Image (cartoon, helix red, strand yellow):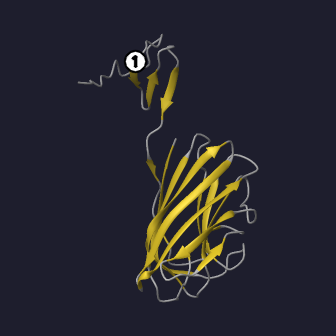
Amino acid sequence: MSILALTSDTLIGTAAAGNIEYNGQFFGTDSNASRAQLQRITSGTAVASTSGTSVEFTNFPAWCKRITVMFSGVSTNSTNLYQVQIGSGSYTISGYTGGYATAGGTAGAMSTGFVIVNNVLAANLHYGAILLTNITGNTWSEFGNIANSAGSNVLTTSAGSIALGGTLDRLRIIASSTGNPADTFDAGSINILYEG
């Protein structure tokens, strides 16, 4: 049986192998007595997607390696594709590779963002999540499943990749056939989880 023990409520002077320390954050030590911070999953604040042409999350910490974007009843006033764009200093609106497909058979390639919803009607509400994962350096991959209220034949599955010019610090959701925000959000909410 394994036992998890907190050695103290303050950081010890010399890290001993196998110790786990607590001082507002968790730190672990390996066999070489090297200390590393163990990042916990952090929840953002849910944003109402009821107005505006984009929903944005910014100020991601440099240690962030994985981001989950969650959708609940999200809708826009028109029929453009839903895209997620990330960036470093500004949003990257080109160079995305990968593709998307719906259960009904419609498919396409990515270019100006991670395309996460296809076959959109203005009345549809969208539910699901996508996962962004740091591969190495500033390269990120995406995978997601988003369904809408019209039925299972419009479940969109997506997967792609992008290499940023620097450390990811921002993410936005837009509805557009290009890389620029177009449709206006009019229902639902979006939130994120991020972790190291």
Q: Is residue 192 above or below residue 76?
A: above
Residue at 67% in and 49% down:
139
Q: Quadrant of residue 58?
A: bottom right
Identify the residue under disc 1: 18
Q: Position of residue 154 (x, y in %)?
A: 47, 81
Residue at 54% in and 84% down:
120
Q: Position of residue 147 (x, y in %)?
A: 44, 75
Residue at 40% in and 23% down:
21
Q: Is residue 69 above or below residue 67?
A: below
Q: Nearer the viewer, residue 143 or 128?
A: 143
Three-letter code for the amino acid on which mark 1 is drawn: Gly
Q: Position of residue 2 (x, y in %)?
A: 27, 24
Q: As drawn, is 34 to the left or to the right of 88? A: left
Q: As drawn, is 35 to the left or to the right of 2? A: right
Q: Nearer the viewer, residue 134 or 5?
A: 134
Q: Quadrant of residue 63?
A: top right
Q: Nearer the viewer, residue 172 or 158?
A: 158
Q: Position of residue 141 (x, y in %)?
A: 60, 54
Q: Is residue 115 above or below residue 136?
A: below
Q: Is residue 103 above or below residue 123?
A: above
